[in-house]
Image: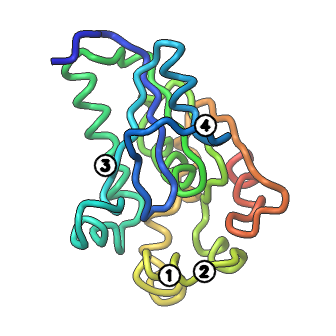
Amino acid sequence: MFESKNLSLLVLIHGGPYWASLNRLELAWHDWASLAASEGWLVLEPNYRGSTGYGDQFLNEIRYRPLSRPGKDILCGVDRLIKDGIVNPHRLVVGGYSYGGFLTNWLITQTRRFNAALSGAGVVDYASAWGMMDMPLPLSYLFGGFPWEVPNIYQNEAPIYQLDRIHTPTHIITGQNDNRVPTSQSYILER
């Protein structure tokens, strides 16, 4: 039984997607879990569908829905913490870097529950990112084809078509020389 109640929550989403959050101390510049916990925050680092370590089926369940499926997993985790009274539903923050930024961008178009967000190297338009990033083939695999083959999947999973639904104050981090996630993606989110 978790003894603390009504805590502030940081949902820290790992990159990848084929990585996993582990029970370890990490002092990387993009991992704020230790800092948040030292300030009294509860940190949820969800291993959503697509994370490594839970078998091939779990890993591949994000194919064709690479944001909505893991996004729903993350929201289920937040809902459970709220239902159990562990976290204060009015003190929720979400953030992540790389694929964690992708998911952060998707989540803030789906719900108003977060009080703040931090999007690091996050994509909002996957068709344009596919054309500019240094590794377009993994993106094509996740979406089930190239942008012209499955445009409906690219559109349904892309925050760019839902930017009018964002009400969460969002801090955006981008790297000028990032070959993986073009800086233009952050500019689109900012506008």
SS type, badge 3:
helix
Residue 29 falls in which quadrant of the image? Answer: top right
Disc 2 target residue: 136
Q: What residue type is labelled 4?
A: Leu
In the rendering, which numbered label is found on residue 27? 4
- Residue occupying image coordinates x 23% and y 67%: 55
Disc 3 target residue: 72
SS type, badge 1:
helix
User: Decide: marks 1, 2 in contact (CB < 8 A)?
Assistant: yes
- Residue occupying image coordinates x 44% and y 34%: 11
- Residue occupying image coordinates x 38% and y 39%: 23
Name which of mark 4 and mark 2 comes first in the sequence. Answer: 4
Q: Which amino acid does label 3 sit on?
A: Lys
User: Decide: marks 3, 1 in contact (CB < 8 A)?
Assistant: no
Mark 4 to mark 1: distance in Å?
32 Å
Q: Position of residue 30 (x, y in %)?
A: 63, 42
The answer to whether 63 is drawn above or below residue 49 in the figure is below
Disc 1 target residue: 140
The answer to whether 27 is drawn above or below residue 60 in the figure is above
Mark 4 to mark 2: distance in Å?
29 Å
SS type, badge 2:
helix
Q: Position of residue 37 (x, y in %)?
A: 48, 21
Q: What residue type is labelled 2?
A: Pro
Q: Which of marks 3 and 4 is in front?
A: 4
Crowdedness near tag 4: few (<14), some (14–19) or many (≥20) residues, C-alpha within 10 Å:
few
Q: Is residue 133 left or right of residue 93?
A: right
